[in-house]
Amino acid sequence: MKLKLGEDIYDICITKKISNKNTYLRVKDDLKIYITTNTFTSNKEIENIILKNQDAIKKMITKVTNKKNKQMGFFYLGKKYDIIKTSNSGIALGQEKFFVNKDFNDNDLEKWYKKEALKIFQERFEICYNNFTEKIPYPSLTIRKMKTRWGVCNTRNKRVTLNLELIKKPVFCLDYVIIHELSHLIHPNHSKEFWLLVEDNCKDYKQIRKIMKED
């Protein structure tokens, strides 16, 4: 059994128990309508109950949807946004909310992150490179998702790889990782000289490292 409300269709799950004297309506997190009723309640009676309680069902669906949206917050450049799904097409980033189409899914979010990262990472990379205190060859930039590292520097190929997850961090974290990897083009190790060079280009690197480890 299904219920159509506007353009949306919701599944109805019916459970009949001989111990139930009354009929109960609930909407769960999966946005299905759950009905628990007596064994002898006919499907026709259930249909009438649903029709009479459409307004109440709409309110329950709205309540569950709003709750899920609040839980679906996501981070972008160090700030948390609530994901709000609407019937509008496209994506809009507000002060505290991220407005997306109701069909927006995790794959769409990943694509959006990548698109933003390509632009922002390149901009910050240029700034960090141009302000770097040592003269170094201009490395190529790669962005990909990594599980254990924020960045990697291939000194042989002069290539810096940044973790896509940095798009969720504050810009100062992104800058620190870029500077860290650029410093490896001078010192391909984590020697005292290496950290002095990092500090020369990022005075607060110790505090930033602590922040990144706490998250």
Image (cartoon, rainbow, N blue to C red):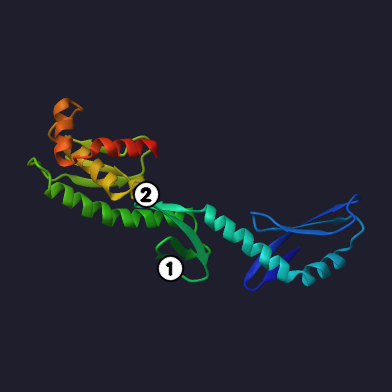
The percent coordinates of residue 37 (x first, y second) are 85, 57
Q: Nearer the viewer, residue 58 or 202?
A: 202
Residue at x-position 45% and y-position 61%: 97
User: Looking at numbered disc 1 in the image, what kind of residue is underneath it?
Assistant: Gly
Question: Residue 153, labelled with which disc?
Answer: none
Is label 2 in a helix, a strand or a loop? helix
Question: Residue 90, labelled with which disc?
Answer: 1
User: Looking at numbered disc 2 in the image, what kind of residue is underneath it?
Assistant: Lys
Quadrant position of residue 43: bottom right
Position of residue 123 in the picture relative to residue 84 (left or right): left
User: Eyeballing the image, is 37 above or below 54?
Assistant: above
User: Circle 2 is placed at which residue position?
Assistant: 168
How many neighbours does mark 1 have within 10 angstroms: few (below 14), some (14-19), or many (20 or more)? few
Residue at x-position 58% and y-position 57%: 67
- Which is more N-terminal, label 1 or label 2? 1
User: Eyeballing the image, is 91 above or below 184?
Assistant: below
Furthest toward the bottom, the residue is: 6
Alpha carbons under labels 2 and 1: distance apart: 21 Å
Is label 1 in a helix, a strand or a loop? loop
Query: Which quarter of the image is occupied by the N terminus?
Result: bottom right
Residue at x-position 27% and y-position 55%: 120
The percent coordinates of residue 156 (x first, y second) are 16, 34
Query: Which quarter of the image is occupied by the C terminus?
Result: top left
User: Eyeballing the image, is 88 above or below 133?
Assistant: below
Furthest toward the left, the residue is: 135
The percent coordinates of residue 18 (x first, y second) are 91, 51
Quadrant position of residue 159: top left
How many neighbours does mark 2 have within 10 angstroms: few (below 14), some (14-19), or many (20 or more)? some
Quadrant position of residue 200: top left
User: Eyeballing the image, is 126 above or below 104?
Assistant: above
